[in-house]
Image (cartoon, rainbow, N blue to C red):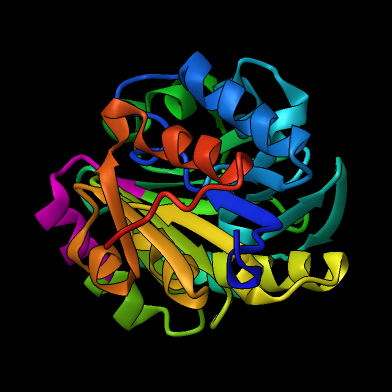
């Protein structure tokens, strides 16, 4: 393997990239591939819109697989089991989001108290349509809490087209935050300019590695910056057009374990990408 393929960090989105939609736990092949990379001296982990506490169950409780991870689209950065950075959303901005969506049919919002979703706007049954796990765990509250919030999501009961229209609304009305669409029925938000790419830079600095020693895998709207940020960004088959366009490399679908197949090759010192 040439120096330009001296990969030291692999980060992958979860939903639609490692985990087929509708499933709750990654395949054994994913876990095996992560361990193969770790055994080869490569830091590997998920880069998800989920908070870290919601990432661990996705890997069947295998803490090693999430010791290095980006949670909440890079708002939480873990390296070797240690939280090395956590970003928070401005309280006035999340209050503004709640005001904008208040009363919109089928629309709501959740904020997180650690790993517990708090339903601050909308109905649980509408949340269940876009993210059933959160709907099962959500606790009803009367107002946005006053503690520092690292994760807030807006949800709706519609398809991708309606979700994008909701995105247009909140992005226009709340310019003090950045928004993206990871999947139908769900919006992420972050401080302006903050994304999974920001989290990658934090890990690279901590490890003392260059950006060309990183491979990223993604499929959804919250993966665009991460895939575009590194020279070896990879899109799985079925990725949204923005991710496909941002990626240097393209592989097969999530449902066929394309990502763990590629990770296994990288762990062996092979280069699995051709186009």
Position of residue 208 measured from the top left corner of the image (x, y, whole percent): 85, 72
Q: Which residues are magenta?
A: 155-167
Q: Residue at x 67, y 44 (%)?
A: 44
Q: Where is 169 relative to 223, above or below?
A: below
Q: Residue at x 61, y 66 (%)?
A: 2
Whether the magenta-drawn stretch holds residue 158 is answered as yes
Q: Where is 12 relative to 258, above or below?
A: below
Q: Quadrant of the N terminus?
A: bottom right
Q: Quadrant of the C terminus?
A: bottom left
16 or 265: which is nearer to us?
265
Q: Is residue 73 left or right of residue 235?
A: right
Position of residue 252 measured from the top left corner of the image (x, y, whole percent): 25, 41
Q: Is residue 162 left or right of residue 94?
A: left
Q: Does residue 230 show up?
A: yes
Q: Does residue 150 show up?
A: no
Q: Where is 31 relative to 127, above or below?
A: above
Position of residue 9 measured from the top left corner of the image (x, y, whole percent): 67, 56
| Quadrant of the image occupied by residue 201 | bottom right
Most common secondary structure along the magenta stretch:
helix
Q: Residue at x 25, y 64 (%)?
A: 244
Q: Residue at x 56, y 64 (%)?
A: 196
Q: Is residue 41 left or right of residue 104?
A: right
Q: Where is 45 relative to 250, above or below?
A: above
Whether the magenta-drawn stretch holds residue 182 is answered as no
């Amino acid at each position: 393997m040439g120096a330009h393929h001296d990969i030291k960090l692999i980060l992958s989105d979860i939903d639609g990239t490692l985990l087929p939609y509708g499933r709750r736990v990654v395949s054994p092949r994913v876990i095996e591939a992560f361990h193969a990379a770790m055994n080869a001296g490569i830091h590997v982990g998920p880069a998800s819109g989920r908070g870290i506490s919601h990432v661990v169950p996705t890997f069947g409780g295998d803490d090693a697989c999430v010791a290095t991870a980006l949670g909440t689209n890079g708002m939480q950065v873990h390296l070797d089991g240690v939280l090395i950075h956590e970003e928070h959303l401005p309280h006035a901005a999340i209050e503004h989001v709640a005001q904008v969506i208040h009363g919109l049919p089928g629309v709501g919002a959740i904020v997180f108290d650690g790993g517990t979703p708090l339903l601050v706007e909308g109905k649980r049954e509408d949340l269940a349509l876009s993210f059933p796990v959160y709907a099962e765990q959500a606790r009803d509250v009367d107002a946005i809490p006053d503690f520092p919030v690292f994760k807030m999501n807006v949800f709706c009961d519609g398809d991708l087209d309606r979700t994008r229209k909701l995105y247009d609304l909140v992005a226009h009305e709340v310019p003090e935050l950045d928004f993206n669409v990871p999947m139908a029925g769900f919006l992420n938000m972050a401080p302006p300019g903050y994304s999974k790419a920001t989290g990658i830079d934090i890990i690279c600095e901590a490890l003392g590695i260059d950006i060309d020693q990183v491979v990223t895998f993604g499929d959804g709207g919250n993966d665009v910056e991460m895939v575009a940020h590194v020279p070896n960004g990879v899109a799985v088959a079925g990725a949204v057009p923005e991710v496909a366009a941002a990626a240097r490399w393209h592989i097969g679908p999530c449902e066929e374990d394309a990502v763990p197949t590629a990770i296994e090759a990288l762990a062996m010192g092979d280069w699995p990408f051709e186009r």
